[in-house]
Image: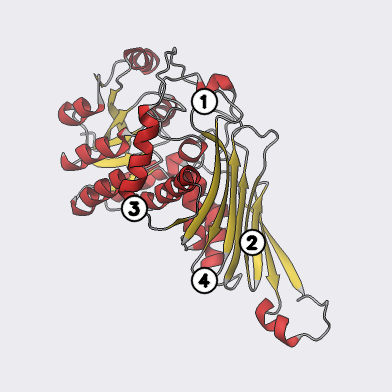
Amino acid sequence: MDKRIKFGIIGTGNMGMEHIMSFFEGKASGGVVSAIADTDSAKLKAALEKFGDGFQAFGSGLELIDKADVDAVIVATPHYSHPELSIAALKKGLHVICEKPAGVYTKQVKEMNAVAKKSKPLFTIMFNQRTSLLYQKMRGIVLEGGIGQIKRINWIITTWYRTQSYYDSGAWRATWAGEGGGVLFNQCPHQLDLLQWITGIMPKKIRAFCHFGKWHDIEVEDDVTAYLEYENGATGVFITSTADTPGTNRFEVLGTKGKVVCEDEKLLHFKLREDEREFCVTNKSGFGQPEFEIEEHKISGEHQHVDIINNFIKAINGEELLFVDGKEGIKGVELMDAMLLSTWLNKAIELPFDDDLYLNELKKRIKSSKKKTVNSVTFNLENTFGASSRWKS
């Protein structure tokens, strides 16, 4: 008897096809795809032609959840439907892997989390970059006090270059009605998750400047600069764009005992021999600086998306603890929403903010959103940014 976990893949676009491929190539051991679904009949047909008809096919995710013979689902659909489909699956007794982001607005994500909290099935978010050993090392150094008290957090992530053809590849892309946001919601959910996961703290205030359709013919943001303030007095800057090339990916966290810098697939740990706060008040030279040493870490050969799926399968079988609690997805959504709300209202936003205020502002943009008529395109994601292997985001 085949005891593998039976998966239903909801959404056969870019990421859905990548997930199906991971099972067919044997990368996701202990699992098998037994059903797929997509509201786009052309994409569904393309998936069947590529992978054969050895599984059930459905015209919607809700139909798959209701009728398919599956133990778990992977939700890889446009963002607005993530909470709805995840809630339906959890209530049906199915385990859920939800693609990022957890949702578009905090109110719907909180509703999803409330259901997940009461449900027996496992619920995780595809935060595959948490599996990066480099980021795990960075997190360990910070949370274990390796840089002392955090003073500054800076991340410039502009390696998300996208052409106009990318935005024209789907009617839902880069529209308020279809996607609910731009670079923050599509490309940066990983970084916004890591921003709080690695440092262990969330901002208390955000002042952001989002530029809408600055570099592309789109409705949503494609260029963002945000200033962050934290409860302990630390400050930060988050910069992203889909129009910079060559781009930069530099994540730096500075504290009283040094700093960690992640860039170019390596991590540098600058270790002060004396706490800066103590040195500041005791050193009498006027221009002196604490001595420091640098430790370098290089780690490669990761599989990221497949690592999340394999952990999920093992967690279902009771062999491992679930690596990512899906309910943590709310934190990244709160950061994205706060950045947009700050721009829309032209002021700093205190966290937590009013969920209904954000939703009402979003509805104004949805109301004026333009419907696009395009021929959907599924791209090859190989060599896109993310992991050091073919499994990219």
* Disc 4 from disc 2: Cα separation: 19 Å
Which residue sits at x=47%, y=36%?
A: 186
Q: Earlier in the sequence, mark 3 or mark 1?
A: 1
Q: Is residue 107 left or right of residue 222?
A: left
Amino acid type at image mark 1? Ile
Which residue sits at x=66%, y=49%?
A: 263
Which residue, given by chain and number where applicable, does mark 4 sit on?
A: 232
Which residue, given by chain and number where applicable, does mark 2 sit on?
A: 260
Measured from the top left, where is residue 343 in percent x and y? 50, 44
Which residue, given by chain and number where applicable, does mark 1 sit on?
A: 218
Kindly state the secondary structure of the residue where label 3 is placed. Answer: loop
Q: Nearer the viewer, residue 4 or 204?
A: 204
Q: Are marks 4 and 2 in contact (CB under 8 Å)?
A: no
Q: Are marks 3 and 1 in contact (CB under 8 Å)?
A: no
Amino acid type at image mark 4? Asn
Q: Earlier in the sequence, mark 4 or mark 2?
A: 4
Kindly state the secondary structure of the residue where label 4 is placed. Answer: loop
